[in-house]
Image (spheres, rainbow, N blue to C red):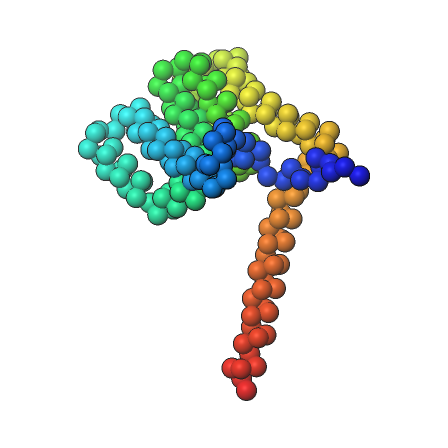
């Protein structure tokens, strides 16, 4: 029988992989696997630029801003993920766009920033499911800001709807695709713990096998 799309599963968030496709147009880059570290390096630079914009929006002085950027840029984990080709930094970029948009909405009150925040977090969730927690945090932040401004109930609710609509829409599209292709709308959620259990079992088996090989030589 012909291979089916369901065979590849849909456990991982899709946009992290799809983001590499534009660079695969250049065949030497694609076949040498250089597309992956190139994209994450570009994302790392964009993340630094976004962090600078966030700090400037928070009215942090130039000297302190430069110091914070240097410390953040020299973080070993950031350097590692910006060069290893994994989509971690891609998720951080779109999450930073969402954070900058939320801060801009707080500073200006313009709804367009709230729309951008919702779109950014919606994309971030499809890069890494963990950013769904950011969506919850942003929701509480929006309610807190609205309460601080003494917005009317209708205005506060409309702000939440503007932010949550792109996030919910992205999740609903992904749930629909899982339903149509795999017949399991929430299989991508339950599969996350399964992946961890399998990997943990493999590590434990490897450690046990190593100990079994070493013990005879060590004890006797």
**Horizontal side, residue 175 vs residue 213: left or right:** right
Q: Position of residue 148 (x, y in %)?
A: 40, 21
Q: Quadrant of residue 104?
A: top left
The single residue placed furthest to the bottom in the displayed view is 220
Q: Position of residue 51 (x, y in %)?
A: 34, 31
Residue 160, above or below 91 = above
Residue 19, above or below 158 = below
Residue at figure coordinates x 76%, y 37% from the top left: 2
Total labels drawn: 0
Quadrant showing the N terminus: top right
Q: Position of residue 202 (x, y in %)?
A: 61, 59
Q: Quadrant of residue 182?
A: top right
Quadrant showing the C terminus: bottom right
Residue at figure coordinates x 46%, y 36% from the top left: 28
Residue 145, above or below 136 = above
The single residue placed furthest to the left in the displayed view is 63
**Horizontal side, residue 69 vs residue 214: left or right:** left
Residue at figure coordinates x 67%, y 39% from the top left: 9
Residue 218 seen in the figure: yes
Residue 143 seen in the figure: no
**Horizontal side, residue 97 vs residue 218: left or right:** left
Residue at figure coordinates x 54%, y 35% from the top left: 17
Q: Quadrant of residue 37?
A: top left
């Amino acid at each position: 029988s012909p291979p089916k799309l369901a065979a590849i599963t849909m456990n991982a968030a899709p946009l992290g992989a799809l983001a590499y496709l534009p660079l695969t147009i250049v065949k030497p880059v694609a076949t040498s696997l250089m597309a992956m570290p190139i994209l994450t390096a570009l994302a790392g630079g964009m993340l630094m630029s976004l962090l600078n914009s966030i700090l400037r929006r928070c009215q942090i002085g130039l000297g302190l801003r430069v110091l914070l950027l240097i410390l953040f840029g020299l973080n070993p984990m950031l350097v590692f993920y910006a060069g290893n080709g994994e989509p971690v930094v891609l998720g951080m970029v779109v999450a930073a766009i969402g954070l900058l948009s939320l801060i801009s909405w707080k500073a200006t009150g313009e709804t367009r920033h709230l729309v951008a925040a919702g779109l950014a977090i919606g994309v971030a969730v499809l890069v890494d499911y963990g950013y769904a927690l950011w969506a919850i945090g942003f929701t509480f932040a929006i309610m807190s800001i609205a309460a601080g401004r003494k917005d009317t109930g209708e205005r506060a609710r409309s702000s939440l709807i503007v932010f949550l609509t792109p996030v919910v829409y992205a999740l609903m599209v992904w749930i629909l695709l899982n339903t149509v292709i795999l017949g399991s709308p929430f299989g991508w959620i339950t599969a996350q713990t399964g992946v961890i259990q399998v990997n943990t079992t493999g590590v434990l088996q490897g450690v046990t096998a190593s100990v079994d090989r070493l013990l005879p030589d060590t004890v006797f």
